[in-house]
Image: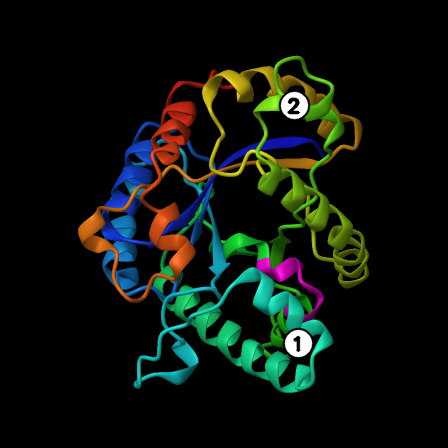
Amino acid sequence: MYEIDFHADDYAASLENSKRILVLLRAGRIDSLSVMTNMGCYAECMGVLRQEWDQFPRKPLLSVHINLIDGFWLSSLPQKQIIHNSWGKIFLHNFLPGRKKIIADYSREMEAQILAFLRETDEIKDADGNPLALRIDSHVHTHMIPLVFEALMLTLDRMNLGGRVRFIRCSAEPLSMFLSTPGIPRSLSPVNLLKNRVLHALSHSVRRKLQRAGIPTGEVFGVAMTGEMDLRRVSLLLPRMQKYAQGKAAYLEVLSHPGHCLSSEITAEYGPDDRKAFLAPQRDVEFDMLMNLPRYE
């Protein structure tokens, strides 16, 4: 059945980043958010979320935002080793020796991150008073990489969670909407266009495997404009994306990154890319989009 979901990634990336997302939650502008469980401020951010939960006009869906890019290796605790990784490096491991060991290592880390999420959300109830559904996505869509997706499914099987997972993001976004909307094509960055095509190619296998496992997924809007989901362009494209999702009777996630870190919060736990991304002024643009975009109820 068709449903639209205005989503915020990266809750618990930092305390200030999370405060920005909380502003949107208090205003009823977010339907769901993804939670990073392996950052140093995670417990504090989740404490604030639980404290304010009953006051939110919309009880958001929560997803584990699997992070294999930066933060701490929770599976290595108490040593507190920091992850230094990149999407490209992980992707290359599909073709290099030692693939099985890497899958096993990532699987142990995913288990640790999922367990951390379950511990902090155990007492949180959804809008109907039921335990929260378990949902999963990942930082910079790494779970779309075959090696990582294999590790994820191995993890869910080992943890006996396959039947409990109610959603895994499949990061497939139709590019035709962007290319055929006046004023949009030239405003797209080459990096985001490439990301859209790579993830779209990987999505076919992911979607088939999710269907076989009986795990729901949906469609996304927010890949070709990652970090650039401004009000003007989202307003132009959203009606077309909605029509596309309605035609497929699909759940549509409108992805955004509205949080913003303080420069003083950027420490060694952030990888090189995120040290820039979490300070980018475009995050203010995405915050404003979510705050001001007309809702279609």
- Residue 184: where, in percent of width, then height? 62, 20
Image position of 105 with respect to 161: above or below: below
The mark closer to the camera, 2 or 1, is: 2
18 to 176, vertically: above or below: below
Judged left or right of residue 10, residue 78 is left
State yes or no: residue 215 in magenta: no
Whole-percent x, y for residue 278 in the image = 35, 47
Q: Which residues are magenta?
A: 142-148
Q: Which color mode does the image show?
A: rainbow
Q: Quick check: is 144 in the magenta stretch?
A: yes
Q: Are marks 2 and 1 in contact (CB under 8 Å)?
A: no
Assign the C terminus to one quadrant of the image.
top right
The numbered disc on residue 154 is 1
Horizontally, residue 89 falls left or right of residue 175, namely: left
What kind of residue is marked 1? Leu
How many residues crowd around disc 1 within 10 Å: few (fewer than 14), some, or many (20 or more)? Answer: many
Seen from the viewer's position, the closer of residues 30 and 200 is: 200
Q: Main secondary structure of the magenta part?
A: helix
Of residues 262 and 130, the one drawn nearer to the viewer in this rendering: 262
Which amino acid, by three-letter code, is at mark 2? Pro
Q: Which residue is mark 2?
A: 185
Task: Name the N-terminal-most of marks 2 and 1.
Answer: 1
